[in-house]
Amino acid sequence: MNIQDINIKYKKVLIRVDFNVPLDAERNITDDTRMVKAMPTIQYALAEGAAVILCSHLGRPKDLSADSDDRQKYSLSHLVYHLSELSGAKVQFVDDTIGAEVEAAAAALPGGEILLLENTRFYKEEKAGDADFAKSMSELADVYINDAFGTAHRAHASTAVIAQYFDKDKRGFGMLMNAELTNARKLSHNPAKPVTAIIGGAKVSDKIQLLKNLIPVMDNILVGGGMAYTFLKAKGGAIGNSLCEDDYLEMAKDILAEAQKENTNIYLPEDSVIADNFAADANTQVVASDNIPDGWMGLDIGSKATQVYSDVIKASKTVLWNGPMGVFEMEAFSKGTFTVAQAVADATSDGAYTLIGGGDSVSAINKAGLAEKVSFVSTGGGAMLEFLEGKELPGVKAIEG
């Protein structure tokens, strides 16, 4: 059930948002994407005359004592001004998540205004999925809406456990959560062929389950980033000092064999931009990816690989991109990633459905200025991966179950 299907007129509505935004040393927001993406749900509720209570986590606070640096650093109070700017509504902040002060503020909150609660993770009960903590939060509102896809894979108190304290017709998904699920299901349920996954990043170990799940669904899997060298070594290639997970060489062989059995094409980069040091000003050259000299490491896919990957992407009807092709934060090793970003945008303009999922890919598509040129950019890296791995997401099950 979605927020539009629930009667929220003049009700108290508790919305779990994902306001886990990056802050600089002065506590200024450096990327407000997650806040912006939550606005349609918040503004819909405000327009319905609802009194909107927002809860979220921010960062990973370790020291939960009252006057700790973590309390200062990760307080949601830093977001109040910008939240008011984005929503156009009056925003009150209460520096707690449960308790008498919060209850009083929620009870007095008029329709059309927002009450922002303090960081849910200032209570250890949040991550523990504590039922009493969830029940206390539930008593603040008539309706519960989960719009935090980024944390839907966590069985935390405010993302999953809380839903049981609301009747089925008084709990639902926000617009962002609904869009994330709709788009993820487009990939996993009868996608238009050819279907291509671009999988990058440092480690094979992080993507094993994803790769296994994608093989039966995909026509092509393009492998880039550090993880490519584990596959290349598994095939007998010389990879120099490139990143390699020796514990996963057999697993890499199994994945390649499984892909062959399923007629799924796995592409490894034919050539690589290599460096004699992990540094922006290192000496570089382009060589065959399976013939990298000792003392050198692959830090980006080379021009031949970039061309092959671009051609495959542009010939696809459905594309998933998760993970960069190289160390794109350094200009010398960014070309592969940005060329792939452009190819994904080109495929989209030719009618392909394209989904970007995963923090680094999102960062890359934004840096390339192409976020508006693809079909969907997911806000939930871990949650999107677990969904595509076929796992049940606690935050989804709690609403639908």
Image (cartoon, grey):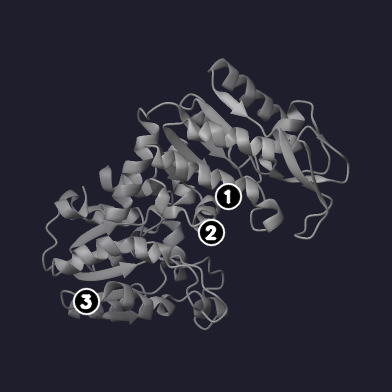
Report the disc number at residue 338.
1
Residue 46 vs residue 129, the one in the foreground:
46
Q: Position of residue 13 (x, y in %)?
A: 21, 65
| Quadrant in the picture for the C terminus | top left
- Residue type at tag 3: Glu
Q: Earlier in the sequence, mark 1 or mark 3?
A: 3
Residue 19 seen in render? yes
Q: Earlier in the sequence, mark 3 or mark 2?
A: 3
Q: Position of residue 49 (x, y in %)?
A: 13, 70
Residue in view at x 55 percent, y 33 percent? 311
Disc 3 crowd rating (10 Å Cα; few below 14, some 14-19, many 20+) is: many
Q: Position of residue 17 (x, y in %)?
A: 35, 62
285 displayed left or right of 375: right
Disc 2 crowd rating (10 Å Cα; few below 14, some 14-19, many 20+) is: some
The Cα–Cα distance between marks 1 and 2, rounded to whole angstroms, is: 9 Å
- Residue type at tag 2: Lys
Residue in view at x 54 percent, y 38 percent? 198
The Cα–Cα distance between marks 3 and 2, rounded to whole angstroms, is: 34 Å
98 displayed left or right of 43: right
Q: Earlier in the sequence, mark 1 or mark 2?
A: 1
CB atoms at circles 1 and 2 under 8 Å apart? yes
Task: Find numbered disc 3 in the image and state the secondary structure of the residue it sits on.
Answer: loop
Q: Determine the image quadrant of residue 384.
A: top left
Mark 2 — residue?
367
CB atoms at circles 3 and 2 under 8 Å apart? no
Which residue is outermost to the right? 294
- Residue type at tag 1: Phe
Question: Which is closer to the viewer, label 1 or label 3?
Answer: 1
